[in-house]
Amino acid sequence: MSRRLMQTIPPPAPPASGRGDSPSLAAASLEGLCPRCGAKTLFDGLVSFAPNCRACALDLAGFNVGDGPAAFLILIVGAILAVGAIVFDQAVAPPWWVHIIWLPIGAALTVYGLRVGKAALIYQEYKHRAREGRLAE
Ligand SMILES: [Zn+2]
């Protein structure tokens, strides 16, 4: 009886605003998607996570991505800006004030890089069920 009942119940509908299936790492990272349902609900600020997914109620506050993305990003964005400024200066030799262009480029790379890095880490934590270490009782 219960088996027959189970077969007649349709599977749960995908969340209304989500894709309904788990996104790939690249899609979740680049677009800020929820690692469980694929809805675009990961961020509620420029680089801050929402407390939970508005589509599937996944508790995002329970994950801790730490400062890893920021520390890694300093090296990458710093290298891109330094090499870009040197190559640009050698090729064009512009007036000094033209190099102000590196400020908004650096800010944009930092914000987008932080979003991608944090989304990638929370995706990996969700997929691999990474949690704080606990002592065995
Ligand atoms: Zn979700």
Image (cartoon, grey):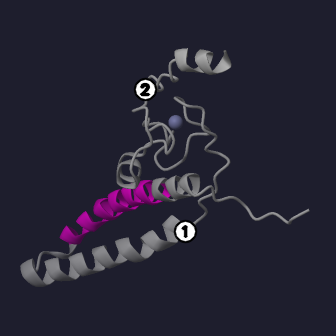
Given the image, on which type of amino acid does mark 1 rest?
Gly
What range of the chain is rendered magenta? Answer: 97-118
Q: CA distance from mark 1 to mark 2?
A: 30 Å
Q: Position of residue 96 (x, y in %)?
A: 20, 76
Q: Secondary structure at mark 2?
A: loop
Q: Which mark is residue 17?
A: 2
Q: Nearer the viewer, residue 79 or 99?
A: 79
| Nearer the observer, 81 or 97 | 81
Classify 10 Å Cα crowding around label 2: few (below 14), some (14-19), many (20 and above): some
Q: Is residue 135 left or right of residue 36?
A: right
116 in the magenta segment: yes
Of helix, strand and loop, which one carries label 1? Answer: helix
How many numbered marks appear?
A: 2
Instruction: Report whether the residue tagged 1 is closer than 8 Å to ligand 1.
Output: no
Q: Position of residue 69 (x, y in %)?
A: 50, 65
* Amino acid tagged 2: Ser
Q: Please, is residue 84 above or below residue 61 in the view?
A: below
Q: Residue at x 55, y 45 (%)?
A: 49
Q: Main secondary structure of the magenta part?
A: helix
Q: Residue furthest right?
A: 137
Q: Is residue 70 above or below residue 125?
A: below
In depth, the one of 99 and 50 nearer the eye is 50
Counting from the top left corner in percent of width and height, residue 37 is at 48, 37
Query: Residue under circle 1?
Result: 68
Q: Earlier in the sequence, mark 1 or mark 2?
A: 2
Task: Tell me residue 35's x, y (percent).
Answer: 49, 45
Looking at the picture, does residue 109 appear above or below residue 22?
below
Which residue corresponds to the image point at 22% horizontal and 76% vertical from the top-left? 84
Cβ–Cβ under 8 Å for marks 1 and 2: no
- Describe residue 103's horizontal placement relative to residue 15 as left or right: left
Quarter of the view holding residue 132: bottom right
